[in-house]
Image: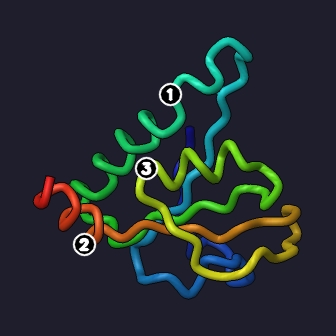
Amino acid sequence: MQDYAVHGWEDHHFFRLPKGSRGIDQFIGEPDMIEKGHGSAFIAERLTTLFEEGVPVVATDPDPANARAIAAYRRAGFREFGAPQATRWGPVLPMKVCRQAVSSWRNES
């Protein structure tokens, strides 16, 4: 997993997110580790750390055809915020989760 400053490139599709926002990417490469809940679990763990550090929004951009990734992000709290789009990195579905949304959800649980 990696996280990165979304404001590192002025032409990045997350550039308009609030100052301090981060993007994330990860890869689970072992076939026997897929569809066991590991993706959403370690994404949620990283979100906790980033939000504790004061990050206001975390965004990600799975391929719109990657239903497994989109489902894992949704389980971790992400929601789409725009239509699929073509970027220099390939097709993406913009998704984000805000610190306030996660804090509210966790306090209700």
Q: Give the residue at mark 2.
A: 100
- Disc 2 crowd rating (10 Å Cα; few below 14, some 14-19, many 20+) is few
Question: Which of the pair 107/16 is nearer the observer?
Answer: 107
Which residue is rendered at x = 48% and y = 39% of the image? 40
Task: State which mark lies toward you, 2 or 3.
Answer: 3
Secondary structure beneath dot 1 equals helix
What is the three-letter code of the residue carrying label 1?
His
- Disc 1 crowd rating (10 Å Cα; few below 14, some 14-19, many 20+) is few
On the image, the x and y values in percent for residue 61 come to: 67, 62
Give whichever of discs 1 and 2 has the lower sequence position: 1
Which residue is rendered at x = 40% and y = 73% of the image? 20
What is the three-letter code of the residue carrying label 2?
Gln
11 left or right, relative to 4: right
On the image, the x and y values in percent for residue 95 come to: 58, 67
Question: Looking at the rendered structure, which numbered label has been put on residue 76?
Answer: 3
Which residue is rendered at x = 36% and y = 70% of the image? 98
Q: Give the residue at mark 1.
A: 38
Quarter of the rendering containing residue 29: top right
82 left or right, relative to 31: left
Question: Which of the pair 22/27 is nearer the observer?
Answer: 27
Give whichever of discs 3 and 1 has the lower sequence position: 1
Secondary structure beneath dot 2 equals helix
Q: Is residue 24 above or below residue 82?
A: above
What is the three-letter code of the residue carrying label 3?
Ala
- Disc 3 crowd rating (10 Å Cα; few below 14, some 14-19, many 20+) is some
21 left or right, relative to 69: left
Which residue is rendered at x = 81% and y = 77% of the image? 85
